[in-house]
Every structure is written in structure tokens, then in C-alpha cells.
Amino acid sequence: MRNPSAGGTKTPCCSKVGLKRGPWTPEEDELLAGYINREGEGRWRTLPKRAGLLRCGKSCRLRWMNYLRPSVKRGQIAPDEEDLILRLHRLLGNRWSLIAGRIPGRTDNEIKNYWNTHLSKKLISQGIDPRTHKPLNPETQNSSSNPPSRAPSSKPAPRARSPNPSPISSGLEETSSGSPAIPKENDQLQSADNMEAVYQNGTATAHVGQTSYLLGLRSGNGLSTEEEDLNCCGDDVFSSFLNSLINEEAFPIQHQLQQQAIGSSPDSDSLIPMAAAPAFGIGTGWESAIMSSVINQDNNSRRLNDQVE
DNA sequence: AAGGGCCTCAACCGCTTGTGC
DNA sequence: GGCACAAGCGGTTGAGGCCCT
């Protein structure tokens, strides 16, 4: 763990002197869990004092969220969870909290760690760039598939922070700052000759050839009412949409060859016809619209959850 | 057995976002 | 609109354990 004395030039998250840092003791865990079980989460800044802990609120929140919360699932990541992480990461990039939100019992920190220590290496060994999910080109593949013993593979290279520091996948339109392009009002996202997504009046519509698909996306400012939320972009619709995206046929990099070999057939349940999936060229502006949908849905769900609580 | 290198993951930091005044 | 505060997020660090020689 971090050395409590290793402050360097950085200022600690809580400037108060005398607060404990470093690993949590079982006694501290008990105090924190007991307090939250009695009083509930929230008001983290004042929680340590009320709970009798010599920790900063941030530290308490992190400990609860990542370790003590009853819903946190401990133990090995199952193969199906790993597969889901891979798919979601391809879709969302380093949006760890969004990814964690779709994997019950797993925390963003856990998924982030698992990605950095296991999955990124695994992809590299398979010749796939973990940042873009694209095949590594031969030159880099030679050097990356046998990464030097440690640092570059286990730890991502430091880089400047940006509001949306996602490495997002193959060919996704990015802003000049490196952020994925989130669709704006009246944006038209053209990804292939017969594919187009139009973002208008807070709603995204996909046109695949002659067919249109209402995606029910809404602008980042969200919804006026819960009803509107549920009607326009209900969880069922969203889940079905997201599931169709997570569906393996929508991932040409990992599955296109396989699909070409066995022949893909249209899937009427999917919002994206399977035959059209490769034409999407996942990683176009299309994916931005998808991501925007995921983010909005996540925010909306959280808001609804808050209201319920 | 000893020591060095590597790996894992809990915890921290700084920044962004949301909210209330 | 501007400010302050709280909460959330992603990147990074480093202690401790494991593995290899």
C-alpha cells in the first residue's frame, strides 16, 4: 500500500494533519460498516467524525464502496464476467464506473485493476491493442506481444488527464483533445455507405439502408420527468439495445472472421441487424451515439435510484 | 535459504461534475 | 453567473506477497 509518509510535493486528499492513512484495520472497517448500516451512506465529509474514525471522508467512501459494501462481490472474476468486461470496454473505453455498473457486485476499481493487470496483457498476447481493440500492426505486434518484463504492460503510460480520457475503440471519431465524439443536436453520424445515425431533438435514429431504428437517446441534460424517461428510453429498451451491442456479432474485430466463416444471419431481436453489424464498422461516430446512450442511461438510472432511496 | 524482480490490488491523488446558495 | 462544497471518476502508486534463480 501507499506509504503514509510518502507525500512528496503532492498534497494529501485531506489537508488535516493527524488523520490516518494507509491500509484499513479490521477495527476501522467495523466502525465504518457499523455506522453506515445504522445511519446510511452519504455526507462523507462529516462521516468520519460522526463514526469516530480518524480518516478523511474520501478514504471512508472508497473503503465502503470498494470493499465493505454488502453488494460487493469478492473473489475471482468469472470467465463470463471477463468476457463482458472486454465487450463493454470495447464499447465504452476506460469508463470503469459505467462498465462496473453493468457487472453486478464488481467495483470500478476492481475492474480497472483487473483490466490493467490481466486483460490488457491478454489482448496484447492475442495481438490486439487493448486501447483500441484493433489488431496490432506487425511491427508493434512483434514488440508488444513479448512485452518487456514489467512496466509498459502492467501499467499504462502516464498521460494528461482529459474530461473523457477514453482510448475508445477502433476508429472512433475523436475530438482534438482525444475525447470520443459525443453526438450533438442535429449531428449526423455516418459510418458506412448504408449506415447513418441522426441525432435530433434529443433522440437518435439509426438508418440502415431503408430501415430506421429509434434508439431513444436523449441529450445530456436528461429528462424532464421520470415518466418521460421510462417512456422514451426505458430500461427494457435500453437493455435490449445494449445487449444487442454487447452481442458478439456486433464486434467485428473479435468475431468478424468467425462470422464470415459461418455466415451471419439477420437477427430480428437486435436493434442492429446482425447482417449490418459488420457494416457498422463499430468504432465510428455510431459508437459515440451508443456510448452517449450508455452514459445518459447510467445517469438516469442513478437519478432514479437516488429518488427511490 | 536468500535475494532480487515481478505481480497484484487497496488506497491515494487530482480533476471533473453536480448541487445549492 | 459565480462561488463553495460534496461526490464521483480515472490514473497512479507502492506495500506485500509470490516466483524464479
Image (tube, coloured by chain):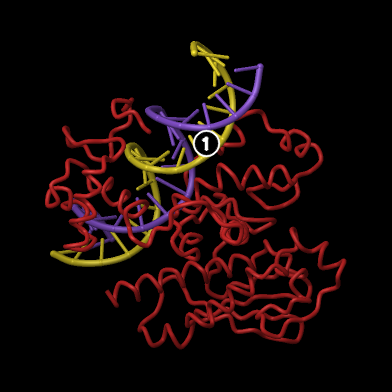
Chain colours: A red, B yellow, C purple
Q: Residue at x 41, y 86 (%)?
A: A228
Judge left or right: residue A121 versus residue A155.
right
Residue identified by numbered label 1: A158
In-image side of A143 versus A227 (left or right): right
Give the residue type that dot 1 points to: Pro
Where residue A283 sits, quadrant-wise, is bottom right
**How far across and down, in percent of the image, does residue A93 sit?**
57, 55
Q: Nearest the camera: A220 or A87?
A: A87
Residue shown at 68% from the left, 53% from the top? A133
Compared to A186, does A181 lie above or below?
above
Q: Residues within 10 Å of mark 1 (few under 14, many from 20)?
A: few
Height in image: A73 above or below B7? below
Residue name at image x 62 percent, y 45 percent: A120
Q: Residue at x 65, y 80 (%)?
A: A271
Residue B2 x, y percent position in the rendering:
49, 11
User: For this view, does A48 lie left or right of residue A2?
Assistant: left
Q: Residue furthest right?
A: A261
Indicate left or right for C7 with A175 as reference. Answer: left
Q: Which of these two is toward me, A167 or A17? A: A17
Q: Secondary structure at mark 1?
A: loop
**Quadrant (top left/top right/bottom left/bottom right) for the C terminus of chain A:** bottom left
Q: Position of residue B10 (x, y in %)?
A: 37, 42
Between residues A64 and A34, which one lies in front from this camera angle? Answer: A34
Q: Position of residue A241 (x, y in %)?
A: 59, 77
Could you tell me which quadrant the N terminus of chain A lies in?
Answer: top left
